[in-house]
Image (cartoon, rainbow, N blue to C red):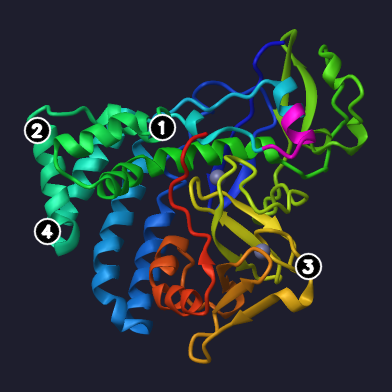
Amino acid sequence: MSALYFTGRKINGDLMAIDRCITSEDRRLTSENRAITSEQIKNSASKLRQARPAYEELIDFYEEFFLAQEESRQRLDIDPIEIELDKLKLKSDNGMPLIDSSHFKIDMEQAEILLKKICTLALNKTQKLSSAAKKILQGLSENRFKSEDIFNSLLKDGRTILKETSKIIDVSEEELIFFAFWAIAPAIRSGAQQLEFYLSKDKSGVKRPDVEMNTSDLESVDMENSDLESSVQRKNVEGEDTLAGIGLNVAGIDLHSDWKKGYCPICGNLPQMAFLNQDGAKYLICGFCQHQWKTSRMGCALCQNKEKEKQHYFYNEEEREYRVDLCDSCGKYIKLIDLRELTRDFYPQLELLCTLHLDIQATEQGYASVLQTISKPT
Ligand SMILES: [Zn+2]
Ligand SMILES: [Zn+2]
């Protein structure tokens, strides 16, 4: 079976489906549709500065940092990750994420440019990271390591090269991971956006896929109950079998609504934050690829425990947009933001940073953070 694929384009925060055979040009996310995010960052940062003056210095630094990332994202040139139909079916039926995080593709040239840029920002703005940033920039200019090697190592080799590099340039592993991860984060996010097409759930105009399953493992699969059924149809374009993605919910984020698991349907990593949308529906945001998926409103979003006596939450009266969900079953907490109470643009990364006081409150109560910026490849 040939490799078949879909893709989507980000249009004003919504995904637009392309229901035809996808050309390689189409498979690249267009830059003009992503520019809006920079305005959202600026709006969010400016309002957060007023609302949370204690975080002003942090916001000043990270605003530039996130703007640099968005700028980089617009210049990325990455081929979409393709998933063969039989693998997609198998994953869909077994509740497996679409890919392992090690399979994300990186635009190495752009990632190095971004690495240098964020190191330079850190050099000028923060005491804490400036020493590491200086050593990374020095190491790069003296060819003591290749950025490509540490980016690959971060995703693929159990971080062996990254650990060695940290010793060579005398930067702690955590600091090197911090810079390296944020340099490849735009590529990971773009890869996830392209993969979102595989999760399409909208049934409008969808025909049951007439898919041949050659492997014995798949012969007994009930296509009627498959997520795959609603997401694909088989078409014949110029005599070639192709799959075409069917319209995602253009009105908003309503992808893969039946997933309802505590890990990302795209890459399998844990969520870093939850939010309630304007309709009160609950979503989780992946800590690795930033994908957002719908989850159940009731019970723990992480371990799915639904016993009422084990589920608690707290919030502070003066910041009603935030809530922290606590679970006595898994012992973890997750921060939740209610978009119905939010009067600024929602940029999750900034909200995460400006709620560090909630992390302190939750950990003081004995709950562990679910926050996982980077997961180790398995
Ligand atoms: Zn993810
Ligand atoms: Zn739990």
Q: Earlier in the sequence, mark 1 or mark 3?
A: 1
Image check: 42 left or right of 269? left
Looking at the rendered structure, the secondary structure element under dot 1 is loop
- Location of residue 195 (image quadrant): top right
Q: Earlier in the sequence, mark 2 or mark 3?
A: 2
The answer, for residue 126, to whether it is visible in the render is no
Q: Position of residue 250 (x, y in %)?
A: 67, 51
Q: Nearer the viewer, residue 347 or 333?
A: 333
- Disc 3: CA contacts within 10 A as few (<14), some (14-19) or many (>=20): some
Q: Nearer the viewer, residue 339 or 21?
A: 339
Amino acid on which the number 4 mark rests in the picture: Asn
Image check: 343 left or right of 181? right
Disc 4: which residue:
124
Residue at point 75%, 35% (across, down): 92
Q: Which of label 2 and label 3 is nearer to you?
A: 3
Q: Position of residue 1 (x, y in %)?
A: 72, 10
Q: CA distance from mark 4 to mark 1?
A: 32 Å
Whether residue 48 is situated above or below residue 135 in the rendered picture: below
Q: Position of residue 21 (x, y in %)?
A: 66, 22
Disc 3: which residue:
306
Image check: 129 left or right of 331? left
- Disc 2: CA contacts within 10 A as few (<14), some (14-19) or many (>=20): few
Q: CA distance from mark 4 to mark 2?
A: 18 Å
Task: Please report contact status of discs 4 and 2: CB closer than 8 Å, yes or no.
Answer: no
Q: Earlier in the sequence, mark 4 or mark 1?
A: 4
- Location of residue 6 (image quadrant): top right
Disc 2: which residue:
141
Looking at the rendered structure, the secondary structure element under dot 4 is helix
The magenta stretch spans which residues? 90-96
